[in-house]
Image (spheres, helix red, strand yellow):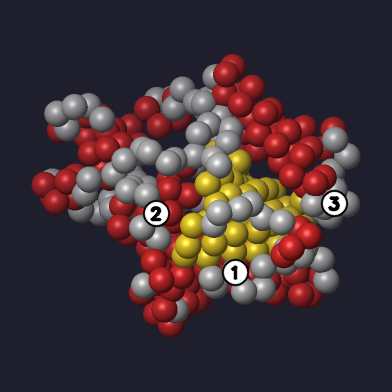
Amino acid sequence: MERSQYPEKYYQRVEKIAEESEIFQHPERFVQVRGKEFSLQEEGNPTALILYMRHGKSEYKEDVNAGFNPATDVDLTEQGQQEVHSGAQKISSVLEGLELKDVPVTMITSNKARAKASGQIVRKDLNAGGFTFSEPEQKVSQATGGVKTFNRSPKEVFETIESLCDDKDIDRYWRSGKLQEEHADFRDIESPEELENRILKTFLQSVDILRKMSQKDNRTEVVVAVGHDEVLGALLAKFKLINFESKDGRLGYGEVAKFYILNDKVVIEYAGKNYEFRI
Protein backbone atom coordinates (compact mmCIF):
# COMPACT_ATOMS: atom_id res chain seq x y z
CA MET A 1 0.00 0.00 0.00
CA GLU A 2 1.39 3.41 -0.93
CA ARG A 3 1.44 5.70 2.10
CA SER A 4 0.11 8.60 0.05
CA GLN A 5 -3.25 6.84 -0.25
CA TYR A 6 -4.30 7.80 3.27
CA PRO A 7 -3.63 10.68 5.71
CA GLU A 8 -0.38 10.35 7.63
CA LYS A 9 -2.28 10.36 10.93
CA TYR A 10 -3.93 7.09 9.85
CA TYR A 11 -0.54 5.38 9.66
CA GLN A 12 0.54 6.97 12.95
CA ARG A 13 -2.60 5.56 14.58
CA VAL A 14 -1.88 2.10 13.17
CA GLU A 15 1.72 2.21 14.39
CA LYS A 16 0.60 3.32 17.84
CA ILE A 17 -1.79 0.37 18.12
CA ALA A 18 1.02 -1.98 17.12
CA GLU A 19 3.50 -0.52 19.60
CA GLU A 20 1.09 -0.54 22.54
CA SER A 21 -0.67 -3.84 21.93
CA GLU A 22 0.66 -7.04 23.46
CA ILE A 23 -1.40 -8.95 20.92
CA PHE A 24 0.89 -7.60 18.22
CA GLN A 25 4.03 -8.60 20.11
CA HIS A 26 2.78 -12.07 21.13
CA PRO A 27 -0.29 -12.86 18.98
CA GLU A 28 -0.21 -16.60 19.70
CA ARG A 29 -1.15 -15.92 23.34
CA PHE A 30 -4.47 -14.41 22.32
CA VAL A 31 -5.90 -17.05 20.02
CA GLN A 32 -7.36 -20.49 20.47
CA VAL A 33 -9.12 -23.05 18.32
CA ARG A 34 -12.82 -23.33 19.13
CA GLY A 35 -14.67 -26.61 19.17
CA LYS A 36 -17.98 -25.04 18.19
CA GLU A 37 -19.50 -22.46 15.88
CA PHE A 38 -20.71 -19.04 16.98
CA SER A 39 -24.08 -19.23 18.78
CA LEU A 40 -26.39 -16.24 18.88
CA GLN A 41 -28.29 -17.78 21.80
CA GLU A 42 -25.17 -18.42 23.90
CA GLU A 43 -23.03 -15.40 23.01
CA GLY A 44 -25.61 -12.76 22.13
CA ASN A 45 -25.67 -10.26 19.28
CA PRO A 46 -22.20 -9.33 18.02
CA THR A 47 -21.28 -5.65 18.06
CA ALA A 48 -20.20 -6.07 14.46
CA LEU A 49 -20.04 -8.69 11.76
CA ILE A 50 -17.52 -8.78 8.92
CA LEU A 51 -18.26 -11.20 6.09
CA TYR A 52 -15.05 -11.46 4.08
CA MET A 53 -15.35 -13.12 0.67
CA ARG A 54 -12.54 -13.98 -1.69
CA HIS A 55 -13.15 -12.89 -5.27
CA GLY A 56 -14.23 -15.47 -7.85
CA LYS A 57 -11.82 -17.40 -10.02
CA SER A 58 -9.93 -15.00 -12.24
CA GLU A 59 -7.78 -15.08 -15.36
CA TYR A 60 -5.55 -12.45 -13.66
CA LYS A 61 -5.37 -10.46 -16.88
CA GLU A 62 -5.02 -7.26 -14.89
CA ASP A 63 -1.76 -8.47 -13.32
CA VAL A 64 -0.05 -9.71 -16.47
CA ASN A 65 -1.55 -7.65 -19.29
CA ALA A 66 -0.35 -4.06 -19.47
CA GLY A 67 -3.20 -3.22 -21.84
CA PHE A 68 -5.93 -4.39 -19.48
CA ASN A 69 -8.78 -1.89 -19.17
CA PRO A 70 -10.71 -2.41 -15.89
CA ALA A 71 -13.59 -0.32 -17.22
CA THR A 72 -14.32 -2.68 -20.13
CA ASP A 73 -12.33 -5.90 -19.71
CA VAL A 74 -13.58 -8.84 -17.63
CA ASP A 75 -11.17 -10.56 -15.27
CA LEU A 76 -13.58 -13.16 -13.83
CA THR A 77 -14.11 -16.50 -15.52
CA GLU A 78 -17.63 -17.91 -15.92
CA GLN A 79 -16.82 -20.32 -13.11
CA GLY A 80 -15.64 -17.37 -11.03
CA GLN A 81 -18.92 -15.55 -11.54
CA GLN A 82 -20.86 -18.60 -10.37
CA GLU A 83 -18.60 -18.86 -7.32
CA VAL A 84 -19.42 -15.26 -6.42
CA HIS A 85 -23.16 -15.85 -6.81
CA SER A 86 -22.81 -18.82 -4.46
CA GLY A 87 -20.84 -16.69 -1.99
CA ALA A 88 -23.50 -13.98 -2.09
CA GLN A 89 -26.13 -16.59 -1.21
CA LYS A 90 -24.05 -17.67 1.78
CA ILE A 91 -23.76 -14.06 2.92
CA SER A 92 -27.51 -13.61 2.61
CA SER A 93 -28.16 -16.77 4.63
CA VAL A 94 -25.82 -15.66 7.43
CA LEU A 95 -27.43 -12.23 7.72
CA GLU A 96 -30.95 -13.63 7.66
CA GLY A 97 -30.00 -16.24 10.27
CA LEU A 98 -28.78 -13.51 12.59
CA GLU A 99 -31.87 -11.40 11.87
CA LEU A 100 -29.72 -8.64 10.39
CA LYS A 101 -31.56 -8.19 7.10
CA ASP A 102 -32.82 -4.75 8.15
CA VAL A 103 -29.32 -3.48 9.01
CA PRO A 104 -27.69 -1.46 6.19
CA VAL A 105 -24.69 -3.28 4.74
CA THR A 106 -21.38 -1.47 4.31
CA MET A 107 -19.61 -2.93 1.26
CA ILE A 108 -15.87 -2.65 0.76
CA THR A 109 -13.81 -4.15 -2.06
CA SER A 110 -10.20 -4.31 -3.08
CA ASN A 111 -9.22 -2.02 -5.94
CA LYS A 112 -8.38 -5.00 -8.17
CA ALA A 113 -10.76 -5.56 -11.09
CA ARG A 114 -11.48 -9.17 -10.05
CA ALA A 115 -12.54 -8.02 -6.59
CA LYS A 116 -14.57 -5.07 -7.86
CA ALA A 117 -16.44 -7.27 -10.33
CA SER A 118 -17.11 -9.80 -7.58
CA GLY A 119 -18.33 -7.03 -5.30
CA GLN A 120 -20.73 -5.78 -7.96
CA ILE A 121 -22.26 -9.26 -8.25
CA VAL A 122 -22.61 -9.57 -4.48
CA ARG A 123 -24.22 -6.15 -4.20
CA LYS A 124 -26.66 -6.89 -7.04
CA ASP A 125 -27.64 -10.26 -5.53
CA LEU A 126 -28.10 -8.84 -2.03
CA ASN A 127 -30.08 -5.91 -3.38
CA ALA A 128 -32.39 -8.31 -5.22
CA GLY A 129 -32.89 -10.10 -1.90
CA GLY A 130 -34.10 -6.92 -0.19
CA PHE A 131 -30.90 -5.82 1.57
CA THR A 132 -30.00 -2.13 1.78
CA PHE A 133 -26.60 -0.48 1.77
CA SER A 134 -24.86 2.39 3.48
CA GLU A 135 -21.94 4.38 2.16
CA PRO A 136 -18.65 3.11 3.60
CA GLU A 137 -17.72 4.93 6.77
CA GLN A 138 -14.52 6.85 6.04
CA LYS A 139 -12.69 5.32 8.99
CA VAL A 140 -13.69 1.80 7.98
CA SER A 141 -12.53 2.42 4.42
CA GLN A 142 -9.18 3.67 5.69
CA ALA A 143 -8.72 0.83 8.15
CA THR A 144 -9.53 -1.82 5.57
CA GLY A 145 -7.70 -0.16 2.69
CA GLY A 146 -6.63 -2.55 -0.10
CA VAL A 147 -3.75 -4.95 0.19
CA LYS A 148 -0.99 -4.11 -2.23
CA THR A 149 1.72 -6.75 -2.18
CA PHE A 150 3.89 -5.24 -4.88
CA ASN A 151 5.07 -1.65 -5.18
CA ARG A 152 5.52 -1.68 -8.93
CA SER A 153 3.92 -3.03 -12.10
CA PRO A 154 2.60 -6.57 -11.46
CA LYS A 155 3.50 -7.53 -15.05
CA GLU A 156 7.12 -6.46 -14.49
CA VAL A 157 7.30 -8.28 -11.17
CA PHE A 158 5.72 -11.53 -12.35
CA GLU A 159 7.82 -11.77 -15.52
CA THR A 160 11.01 -11.17 -13.56
CA ILE A 161 10.19 -13.59 -10.74
CA GLU A 162 9.19 -16.29 -13.21
CA SER A 163 12.62 -16.07 -14.78
CA LEU A 164 14.24 -16.45 -11.34
CA CYS A 165 12.35 -19.23 -9.56
CA ASP A 166 13.11 -22.81 -10.56
CA ASP A 167 9.66 -24.37 -10.15
CA LYS A 168 7.77 -21.41 -11.71
CA ASP A 169 5.62 -21.17 -8.55
CA ILE A 170 5.75 -17.39 -8.25
CA ASP A 171 3.51 -17.24 -5.19
CA ARG A 172 5.55 -19.77 -3.20
CA TYR A 173 8.81 -18.11 -4.19
CA TRP A 174 7.63 -14.75 -2.83
CA ARG A 175 6.23 -16.29 0.37
CA SER A 176 9.52 -18.05 1.08
CA GLY A 177 11.23 -14.65 1.44
CA LYS A 178 13.93 -15.65 -1.05
CA LEU A 179 12.95 -12.96 -3.51
CA GLN A 180 13.98 -10.12 -1.21
CA GLU A 181 16.97 -11.98 0.24
CA GLU A 182 18.53 -13.08 -3.04
CA HIS A 183 17.71 -10.19 -5.36
CA ALA A 184 18.57 -6.63 -4.39
CA ASP A 185 16.29 -5.15 -7.06
CA PHE A 186 13.26 -6.50 -5.17
CA ARG A 187 14.11 -5.29 -1.66
CA ASP A 188 11.33 -2.68 -1.93
CA ILE A 189 8.64 -5.35 -2.34
CA GLU A 190 6.61 -6.13 0.77
CA SER A 191 7.76 -9.40 2.34
CA PRO A 192 5.39 -12.02 3.82
CA GLU A 193 6.38 -10.91 7.33
CA GLU A 194 5.70 -7.26 6.53
CA LEU A 195 2.33 -8.21 5.03
CA GLU A 196 1.41 -10.22 8.15
CA ASN A 197 2.31 -7.28 10.40
CA ARG A 198 0.31 -4.80 8.32
CA ILE A 199 -2.77 -7.02 8.14
CA LEU A 200 -2.74 -7.51 11.92
CA LYS A 201 -2.46 -3.75 12.47
CA THR A 202 -5.35 -3.23 10.06
CA PHE A 203 -7.38 -5.93 11.78
CA LEU A 204 -6.88 -4.40 15.24
CA GLN A 205 -7.87 -0.94 14.06
CA SER A 206 -10.92 -2.25 12.19
CA VAL A 207 -12.17 -4.04 15.32
CA ASP A 208 -11.64 -0.89 17.38
CA ILE A 209 -13.51 1.31 14.88
CA LEU A 210 -16.45 -1.07 14.42
CA ARG A 211 -16.94 -1.44 18.17
CA LYS A 212 -17.13 2.33 18.51
CA MET A 213 -19.52 2.62 15.56
CA SER A 214 -21.77 -0.05 17.09
CA GLN A 215 -21.89 1.82 20.37
CA LYS A 216 -22.75 5.05 18.58
CA ASP A 217 -25.41 3.51 16.32
CA ASN A 218 -26.72 1.09 18.97
CA ARG A 219 -26.81 -1.80 16.51
CA THR A 220 -24.73 -4.58 15.02
CA GLU A 221 -22.55 -3.11 12.28
CA VAL A 222 -22.45 -5.24 9.12
CA VAL A 223 -19.53 -5.11 6.70
CA VAL A 224 -19.26 -7.21 3.55
CA ALA A 225 -15.70 -7.11 2.22
CA VAL A 226 -14.53 -8.64 -1.05
CA GLY A 227 -10.81 -9.15 -1.48
CA HIS A 228 -7.98 -11.63 -1.73
CA ASP A 229 -6.97 -14.78 0.09
CA GLU A 230 -3.67 -13.33 1.32
CA VAL A 231 -5.54 -11.05 3.74
CA LEU A 232 -7.02 -13.86 5.83
CA GLY A 233 -3.95 -16.00 5.17
CA ALA A 234 -1.62 -13.33 6.51
CA LEU A 235 -3.74 -12.85 9.62
CA LEU A 236 -3.86 -16.57 10.42
CA ALA A 237 -0.15 -16.91 9.71
CA LYS A 238 0.61 -14.09 12.13
CA PHE A 239 -1.29 -16.01 14.82
CA LYS A 240 0.75 -19.15 13.94
CA LEU A 241 -2.38 -20.99 12.78
CA ILE A 242 -1.15 -21.69 9.26
CA ASN A 243 2.17 -21.62 7.42
CA PHE A 244 2.07 -18.69 5.02
CA GLU A 245 4.54 -20.42 2.68
CA SER A 246 1.95 -23.16 2.16
CA LYS A 247 -1.38 -22.75 0.42
CA ASP A 248 -3.03 -25.15 2.84
CA GLY A 249 -5.88 -23.72 4.89
CA ARG A 250 -6.42 -20.78 2.55
CA LEU A 251 -9.74 -19.24 1.51
CA GLY A 252 -11.06 -20.65 -1.79
CA TYR A 253 -12.61 -18.64 -4.60
CA GLY A 254 -16.00 -17.27 -3.60
CA GLU A 255 -15.69 -18.66 -0.08
CA VAL A 256 -16.77 -16.56 2.88
CA ALA A 257 -15.05 -16.07 6.24
CA LYS A 258 -17.18 -14.79 9.13
CA PHE A 259 -15.80 -12.40 11.75
CA TYR A 260 -18.11 -12.05 14.77
CA ILE A 261 -16.87 -9.07 16.76
CA LEU A 262 -17.98 -9.16 20.41
CA ASN A 263 -17.05 -6.92 23.34
CA ASP A 264 -14.11 -9.03 24.49
CA LYS A 265 -13.28 -11.32 21.59
CA VAL A 266 -13.56 -11.96 17.87
CA VAL A 267 -14.78 -15.32 16.58
CA ILE A 268 -13.60 -16.26 13.10
CA GLU A 269 -15.20 -19.08 11.11
CA TYR A 270 -14.24 -20.28 7.65
CA ALA A 271 -13.94 -23.57 5.77
CA GLY A 272 -15.17 -25.55 8.78
CA LYS A 273 -12.56 -24.02 11.10
CA ASN A 274 -13.35 -21.95 14.19
CA TYR A 275 -10.96 -19.60 15.99
CA GLU A 276 -11.36 -17.21 18.89
CA PHE A 277 -9.25 -14.06 19.28
CA ARG A 278 -9.34 -12.53 22.78
CA ILE A 279 -9.09 -8.84 21.96
The residue singled out by tag 3 in the image is 99
Label 3, residues with CA under 10 Å away: few <14, some 14-19, many ≥20: few
Residue at (14%, 51%) from the top-left corner? 181
Task: Tell whether label 2 touches label 1 (CB within 8 Å).
Answer: no
Q: Secondary structure at mark 1?
A: loop
Label 2, residues with CA under 10 Å away: few <14, some 14-19, many ≥20: some
Task: Tell whether label 3 touches label 1 (CB within 8 Å).
Answer: no
Instruction: Name the image quarter holding the C terminus.
Output: bottom right
Q: CA distance from mark 1 to mark 3?
A: 21 Å
Residue at (37%, 27%) from the top-left corner? 64
Q: Which mark is residue 265?
A: 1
Q: Quadrant of residue 82?
A: top right
The residue singled out by tag 2 in the image is 241
Amino acid type at image mark 3: Glu
Question: Does any portion of residue 142 appear in the rendered image?
Answer: no
17 over 99 or under it: above or below: below
Residue at (70%, 31%) from the top-left corner? 121
Closer to us: 225 or 75: 225
Q: CA distance from mark 1 to mark 2?
A: 17 Å
Q: Quadrant of residue 212?
A: bottom right
Amino acid type at image mark 2: Leu
